[in-house]
């Protein structure tokens, strides 16, 4: 099971990189080959995963969409994890009014359930893939900040921290060298669930029309456009949906496996 | 208790402030975005003062908060009606769908979670955890079309979209509720297993209570606290999840209103819907906490 999850995640990364590097033509229109079902040979050649309402190759669009989801997931998780962790460590280590202020801020951000804040922010920023990354990062830092803060609150009284302080380490050095390394395990687990969340969020925003703009392919926008032809060509919705669910499922499974391996009992909100 | 209420007030204040400052994300000048670059200067000025953009930021913020406290969410730019009125019109449909979805969550999660814990390690438990994992990983904007494909198009049992036809709430409720049911089921199972090793359950079994009695009288009441917290979080979360679900099924609630507002760049309306959902979420969580404290006084002491 876990091998399968690893393989799917690996395939996703590979497809994403291919999508970024290969000179694909995901937007090439071939009206004579529209709505080709998967594995059917046409005058335009073989369509492994079929074609859409404009005769565009679903395989190429899938690869293109993989690149988008990989890019958004890595960027938004990278940004929100590093910013959130820094803020969380600062709050936990400094305590006092800094902690109270940051904790309040975290509480306020957590008052927006699910994708609501990202939808609102993306709506304000306007569509576009860069705005999706901004919105997801603005929403995502909170989880890492809360995790880091709670961990640091219990770690800061450890002997090695007191020893480092007594030896005259600056607060910045204590946080970076003596606290951050101890946070890596729980942060890594949180980040793997974060990848799953970001992939769903990007697809969700694109489904709502707030993400990538046509003709650019994203798994979410492919589903959105395919829904109109559900009756004639269900593969337009099935293909990106299966890819999306498989990637999310394997990211969740890898997160579970990582948690069991690293034996971290406490896990923060998903 | 008083502290909890005070905290909630501060969070609500922060939430409305954050919602107010959402407009700061609009690139450039909102007036340019709405009217386009080539609009006449007089039109721009008129809209600017209609939106209050000619006044200082702090003053606008203060005024926004003052309005929110009195239930005034401003004026829709596109529909020239009060935002509060537009939301009130659409809210019942969303609440209806959320309630139906919550029923789906309860009907699936409670029996499945209890059965999975009861038959731990057996086929039924494995099947339930597969359901939980898959349910959690299928995004609702894919699940929705799949359900439509199966129940509306292939079988022809249920309407494809809209809210008029009888039974039209079933597919949206399933779409919205399934992933939450999966999470709650996992939670209930874990919580029941944790309780299962307690002494009072051994005592209950030793005195000859049937497994069903043990589950119902001793295990479930004690295992329910974390599940209740989660259900409270989810009940609020249903309001946010409703946004995507309403778009899939063309359901006339505040979720589709939010997306319409975004398409029309109706900023006050966007702010209003987001604020209403967030406030609803915070209040549901507050109520859950109070309910938990009432059910189990120990819950309050640890705070």
Image: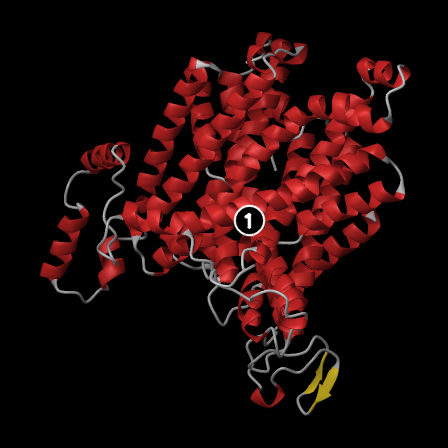
Q: Quadrant of residue A53?
A: bottom right
Is A212 left, or right, of B302 in this rendering?
A: left
Q: Is residue B18 visible to us here? A: yes
- Residue B277 horizontal/vertical position (percent): 42, 41
- The one nearer the camera, A163 or B11, is B11
Q: Is residue B267 above or below residue B214?
A: below
Is A140 left, or right, of A46 in this rendering?
A: left
Q: Is residue B36 above or below residue A52?
A: above
Is B74 left, or right, of B97 in this rendering?
A: left
Residue at 61%, 71% in the rendered image: A61
Q: Chain of mark 1?
A: A
Residue at 40%, 27% in the rendered image: B11
Question: Which quarter of the rendering shows the C terminus of chain A?
Answer: top right
- Residue A210 horizontal/vertical position (percent): 45, 58
Q: Quadrant of residue B232?
A: top right
Q: Is residue B288 above or below residue B172?
A: above
Read off the residue under disc 1.
Answer: A75
Is A108 left, or right, of A192 in this rendering?
A: left
Determine whether the residue tagged by mark 1 lies in a helix, strand or loop. helix
- Residue B44 horizontal/vertical position (percent): 15, 58
Q: Residues within 10 Å of mark 1 (few under 14, many from 20)?
A: some
- The one nearer the camera, B240 or A32, is B240
- The one nearer the camera, B67 or A20, is B67
């Amino acid at each position: 099971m876990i091998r399968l999850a690893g393989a799917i995640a690996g395939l996703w990364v590979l497809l994403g990189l291919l999508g970024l590097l290969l000179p694909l033509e995901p937007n090439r229109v071939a009206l004579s080959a529209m709505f080709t079902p998967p594995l059917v040979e046409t005058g335009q050649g073989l369509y492994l995963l079929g074609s859409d309402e404009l005769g565009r190759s679903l395989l190429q669009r899938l690869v293109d969409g993989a690149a988008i989801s990989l890019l958004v997931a890595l960027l938004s998780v990278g940004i929100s994890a590093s910013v959130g962790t820094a803020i969380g460590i600062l709050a936990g280590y400094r305590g006092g009014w800094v902690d109270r202020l940051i904790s309040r801020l975290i509480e306020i951000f957590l008052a927006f359930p699910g994708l609501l804040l990202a939808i609102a922010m993306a709506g304000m920023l306007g569509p576009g893939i860069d705005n999706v990354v901004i919105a997801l990062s603005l929403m995502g830092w909170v989880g890492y900040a809360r995790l880091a803060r709670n961990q640091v609150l219990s770690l800061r009284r450890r002997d090695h921290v007191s020893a480092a302080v007594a030896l005259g380490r600056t607060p910045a050095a204590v946080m970076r060298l003596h606290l951050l390394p101890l946070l890596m395990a729980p942060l890594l687990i949180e980040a793997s669930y974060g990848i799953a969340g970001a992939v769903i969020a990007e697809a969700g925003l694109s489904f709502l029309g707030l993400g990538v703009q046509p003709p650019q392919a994203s798994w979410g926008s492919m589903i959105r456009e395919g829904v109109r032809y559900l009756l004639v060509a269900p593969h337009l919705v099935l293909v990106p949906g299966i890819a999306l669910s498989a990637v999310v499922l394997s990211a969740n499974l890898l997160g579970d496996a990582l948690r069991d391996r690293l034996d971290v009992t406490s896990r923060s909100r998903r | 208790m008083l502290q909890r209420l005070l905290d909630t007030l501060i969070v609500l204040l922060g939430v409305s402030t954050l919602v107010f400052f959402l407009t700061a994300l609009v690139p450039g000048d909102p007036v340019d975005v709405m009217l386009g670059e080539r609009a006449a200067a007089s039109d721009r000025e008129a809209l600017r003062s209609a939106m209050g953009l000619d006044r200082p930021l702090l003053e606008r913020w203060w005024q926004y908060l003052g309005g929110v406290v009195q239930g005034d969410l401003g004026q829709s730019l596109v529909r020239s009606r009060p935002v509060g009125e537009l939301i009130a019109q659409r809210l019942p449909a969303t609440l209806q769908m959320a309630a139906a979805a919550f029923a789906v969550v309860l009907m699936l999660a409670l029996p499945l979670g209890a059965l999975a814990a009861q038959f731990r390690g057996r086929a039924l438990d494995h099947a339930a955890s597969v359901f939980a994992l898959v349910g959690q990983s299928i995004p609702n904007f894919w699940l929705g079309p799949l359900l439509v494909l199966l129940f509306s198009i292939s079988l022809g049992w249920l309407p494809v979209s809209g809210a008029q036809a009888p039974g039209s709430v079933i597919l949206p409720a399933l779409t919205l509720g399934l992933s939450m049911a999966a999470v709650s089921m996992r939670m209930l199972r874990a919580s029941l297993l944790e309780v299962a090793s307690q002494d009072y359950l051994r005592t209950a079994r030793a005195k000859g209570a049937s497994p069903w009695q043990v589950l119902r009288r001793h295990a479930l009441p004690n295992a329910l606290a974390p599940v209740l917290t989660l259900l409270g979080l989810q009940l609020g979360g249903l309001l946010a999840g409703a946004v995507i679900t309403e778009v899939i099924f063309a359901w006339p609630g505040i979720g589709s209103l939010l997306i319409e507002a975004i398409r029309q760049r109706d900023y006050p309306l966007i702010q209003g819907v987001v604020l209403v959902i967030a406030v609803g979420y915070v209040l549901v969580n507050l109520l859950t906490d109070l309910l938990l404290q009432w059910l189990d006084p120990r819950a309050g002491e640890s705070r």
